[in-house]
Amino acid sequence: MDDLLAEFVAETREMLAALSGEIVAWEADPADRARLDTIFRFVHTVKGNCGFFDFPQLEALSHAAEDALSDVRNGRRNADRQLVDAVLAVIDRIGVMIEEIERGEAISDAADDNLIAALKGAPDAEVHLAPVSGQQPTATTAAEQRTIRLPVDLIDQVMSGVSEMVLARNDLARRMQHMGTDTGLETTFARLSSLIAEVRDAITRTRMRRIEGLFSTFPRLVRDLSAELGKQVFIELENGEVELDREMIELIRDPLLHIIRNAVDHGIEVPAERRAAGKREAGMLTITARQTGNTIWIGIQDDGRGIDCDRLAAKAVAAGLRTEQEVAALSRAERIELIYEPGLTTADAVTSISGRGVGMDVVRANLEKFGGTLEIETTAGEGTRFLIGVPLTLSILPSLTIEAGGQKFAIPRSYVEEIVSTAGGQLEFAQVGERRYMTFRNRRLACVSLGDALALERPAGEEELFVILRLGWGDLYALAVDQIFDHQELVIKPLSPAIMESGLFVGCTQLDDGTPVLVLDVAAIGYSAGIPRELQRPVAPSQESEAIESEGLRVVLFRGLDGERRAIAMSVVEQVERTASSNIRHPGPDAQVVLGEDILSIAGVPEAPELPERFTVLKLNDGGERIAYAAREVLDISTLTGELKHVQGQTLVAGVTLVDREPAELVDCHALFARHVSRQIGTHALTCRLDGEDAWMRSFLGPIIEAAGYRVVEGTGPADVVFVDDGTAREELGVARKAIRLRSAPGSAGGSDTIYRYDRAGLMAALLRVGEELAA
């Protein structure tokens, strides 16, 4: 293809990309002479350019469109739907011809006669619009002058060269420092640094394109989708002049198209339904773009029915993604999160538009791959708003350099919310099960050690530096690191596939001194450390709420085995640990649990034999006695500030209150201990006698026996159980229902019916077994 023909193809492509939106807007407002003139100039330009080439089909088609539009301009014809459909079909046909010309193929002998007849107003002419995928190339503005077209690979190569120049400049700066203060090169070096910075900025700008080129494809897409679905949808575009890296534009194209399709298909109602709801028949879809720092925020908002959380939950149950019990325990926000479940669709039938179950999970995953975020705001009956946040460019990434385990890493600065240190004494820590939590400015954040997450050796002692990171779905967590160095703008390069398979890194880069470092995928590190998507989004409280919270009751919020949200005073929670269901004896109100060397009464265990294989146990201590409480999971540490509502018929519930705007039962600790401690040490507790005057038995065995729920009795009176030495004769046992014999030597020298006196686990098991036998 010669240069003149290549220029014709490129110019026509640019005008085509910008034109479809103009035609749809002209149809909505036929009196808009400016848009009519724009469309007319396009077909006129195409027809004129065909004079330099031998494209008779293209020339005939554009000539017919020019005549029809000229009649409209002169008032001899109205811009009705038939004409607009014909013009759109001509635009599609011209696009196909241009692709064939670019490939060097002969223009196909398509039936253009129908199109020409439709343009002339023939009533029986049929027009078939091509399906719109939204993949039209983006356009530059017609006002741009003195432009040239370059391959993107060439621009990337220049950018890579400039980055190497930056590293060489920094190396020169260090050498000049070693040479002394007066080298005679300071002025030249300063000029060199300035020139390199200017070239770097200029090369970066060559990669930027206005987002309106992408936005211009949406009006045609929305028009065709709404027509296919029997709906009326207007589209409003704002701030299309925002510039974005051209690579980023290509990456966000598919997510945007999917969300727009969802908005038109699932969100906006048909006219009859909108009238019944008191809305205007035509729905409104608003797409906006704005820049905040190095982030571009794109909003897609409709005024439709909103997301039906209950319907989503029902679909999740029907698809086998959740059980009815799990769905019943979900909050409204958690039900909205179900929209991201793979394979979940709310469509009743599979169509060319939706219903295949390939949806929002893919959209969010694609956005998160390059540091993007996706947030959803929805109100039933009013509409839904999707907010996408993407970095301005992928080539240069503002980053924070850190160190863990003696290795340096980089974190994208867009994730960094704050940097805190334990040196100021403002941080509070709490261990809840296996998770460590930090309280900072009344925010409770899960802590993740970067060294542990990457299996790196780190210095002994507690970490003192934390980077507060905001994940793509709005949650925060604290990343513990050894050192924090500086903010730098780094050029990101791809990693080898072997390293990318780990899923913990997004690329690599070089620091100013030439040191290679890996760029962390902070979302993946959060996932791998067990930070779930469903974490409660922390919100900074106001001063008034801080004052109230300081006077409230600190509680551990958990979900019971029955799925209910409950809270219990944090002051009585001694420890949180995981245990197996095999450690439970007598499920129900008289349940006991073996925790290490302790046998405790445990509340919250249903009588049903089907228990989770492993679950969480809250070990409670009132300062003297200990019991346990079974839980499915620990949710958070919170403060009760709301009003407590009494519940009739619930003896172990002090009341119901709102915790983080959701109801939760507050466990009545007094009633709980009154019921279960009496079972452990009450008058009906089993008794145990220690044989003889051996002080070892009283000092060593006494605490173990009492911890197992037995009451130690003195003297030679009757007892349920008696501990004796292996050599004690049967007639010397006294009155006792069961005897446990102890031997002094380890191993099995004393026989299988004896227990080594320092086999603590064996002693606890024997007490539990004997208790079960006596209870039976």
Image (cartoon, rainbow, N blue to C red):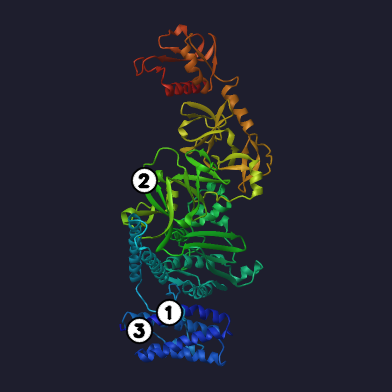
Q: Is residue 113 visible?
A: no
Q: Amino acid at mark 2?
A: Gly
Q: Work out whether mark 1 precedes mark 2 in sequence or the reverse, and give the earlier one.
A: 1
**Residue 672: x %, y % from top left:** 61, 31
- Tag 1 residue: 14
Q: Residues within 10 Å of mark 3 (few under 14, many from 20)?
A: few
Question: In the rendered image, which quarter is residue 521 located in?
Answer: bottom left
Cβ–Cβ under 8 Å for marks 2 and 3 = no
Q: Residues within 10 Å of mark 2 (few under 14, many from 20)?
A: some
* Element type where label 2 sits in the image: loop
- Tag 3 residue: 108
Cβ–Cβ under 8 Å for marks 1 and 3 = no
- Tag 2 residue: 406
Q: Amino acid at mark 1?
A: Glu
Q: Work out whether mark 1 precedes mark 3 in sequence or the reverse, and give the earlier one.
A: 1
Above or below, 558 relative to 602: below
Above or below, 605 relative to 138: above
- Which residue does the image show at 36% across and 41% down from the upper left? 457
CA–CA distance in space, label 2 to label 3: 65 Å
Q: Amino acid at mark 3?
A: Ser
- Which residue does the image show at 48% across and 92% down from the upper left? 67
